[in-house]
Amino acid sequence: MLRKNRLTKLPIVMELKQFLQLGWPILLAELLQMSMGFVDTVMAGQYGATDLAAVALGASILFPVIIFLAGILLAVIPTVSQYFGARQYDLIGPYVQQSIWLGLILGLLAMALIRIAESLFALLDINGVLRSIALNYLNAAAFSLPAIAILQSLRCFSEGLGITKPIMVVSLISLLLNIPANYLLIYGKLGLPEMGGAGCGWASAMSFWISLLIMFGYVAWRQDYRLFAILSHFPRPEPSTLLTILKLGLPIGLAIFMETTAFSVVALFLAPMGATVVAGHQLVLNFSSMVFMVPLSIGMALTIRVGQSVGAGRPDLIARTIRIGFSLALILALVSCSLMLLWPETLAGLYSNDAAVTDLAIQLFLFAGIFQVSDAVQIAANGALRGYKDTHIPMLLSLIAYWLVGLPLGYILAMTDILEPRMGAQGFWIGLIVGLTCAALLLGSRLWWVSRHYWRHDIKN
């Protein structure tokens, strides 16, 4: 039978235990999914520096698209969790079915969008072998986008109910499939063509489609999901419901997109400086993205718990949940900061044996370590706000922080002599630090305001 979420006032230790039980599978799932990017980067780097740079360039375009898709479909979590908290179980199934249709539509549109990468590379004067490998990687990886979007819909449905372990298992299977597939396609084993870095794209596409089939099978098999009849009597797309999901989810996707593209655009600006600079930046960005999954998982747990408490009409539980979530986020941010500041040489050495690449990466790890606390605060605040279904104002605040403050400042420091002699990659990372700090202050203030006024004014952005 479906496990009911116990929205009762428990001692702080018991609530912390519940929060951790909800959050640790999300964390492992996020780390496993990001590990696919880590594996791609490492295996492409072992094949050659040019392939590493090409996969980095391809990922700088692909990753924001994936994040954007996933962000839109994150709307499923607060909606399902609020329905679940309010015991409106009959509304969950039809909503999730429409989110699956939306995932398919968005995934196909994203596949078409990836085709503009060739024009973008030409605009940025990225040519030769680097361009060729990056385009081949992107064209292959694009086939995974519909599977990723539909899988995200099913994942958010499950997590909105408070069932967080299935996606962890599916993510592990996907990673275990991706590693041997990468090896076979990068190096051309078992009679397959030797594709180099481009083989990572085909391996990812295969892994995600198989993962989606496994998740569908799990939803059909597990009794907890049968109450909602997700896979029976599947209706046609309903434009009104699709628009409702988009209205809530599009600001989430745009907010996450604006943050991730602020990082990815840096790689594109650095491309003319050569493969070594791009590769060094990519090493730090890839590891930082993996570490980012820790506060992101806490933010998702906050969305679930806050959403269920909103549905049940329990503001007292929301306040305690937010305190627990922020405390965990800050403690773990200090751990990741210490790791980057104390052992940058070891971390850089995991990715590459090229001395020039690792030397630059070691310098950039200093900046990545500094912004860990700000990053943790802004993602935790965003997660809690989504539980309230407050998404439009946070999107605008993210726009200000990343695109009106952080990225312009980074460009000025890195590429011009206006404030200081041009600093190259380090200048962009200083801009990112300022942008993330700005986001933490703005989103933290918004959460404080919403938490004080939601129940009085019924805020619905």
Image (spheres, helix red, strand yellow):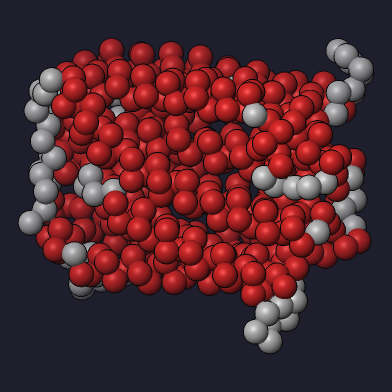
Report the front residue among 322 and 182.
Answer: 182
- Which residue is at a point 67% across and 54% down the rendered structure image? 42
Residue 306 is left or right of residue 207, and the answer is left
**Spot occupied by residue 110 in the image (x, y as percentages of width and height):** 58, 59
**Image quadrant assignment for residue 221:** bottom left
The residue depicted at 42 percent of the width and 57 percent of the height is 171
Q: For the C terminus, which image quadrant?
A: top left
x%, y% of residue 22?
Answer: 26, 39
Q: Is residue 120 visible?
A: no
Query: How many tags in the picture?
Result: 0
Q: Nearer the viewer, residue 125 or 212?
A: 212
Residue 197 locus on image (x, y percent): 73, 64
What residue do we see at 82% from left, 46% from top? 354
Is 11 situated above or below 354? above
Left or right? Give the position of 360 relative to 260: right
Image point 36% across, 44% down: which residue? 26
Residue 5: quarter of image:
top left
User: Would residue 72 appear left or right of 42 to someone viewing this image?
Assistant: left
- Screen quadrant of the N terminus: bottom left
Q: Is residue 358 visible?
A: yes
Query: Residue 106 location in percent, x, y?
Result: 49, 59
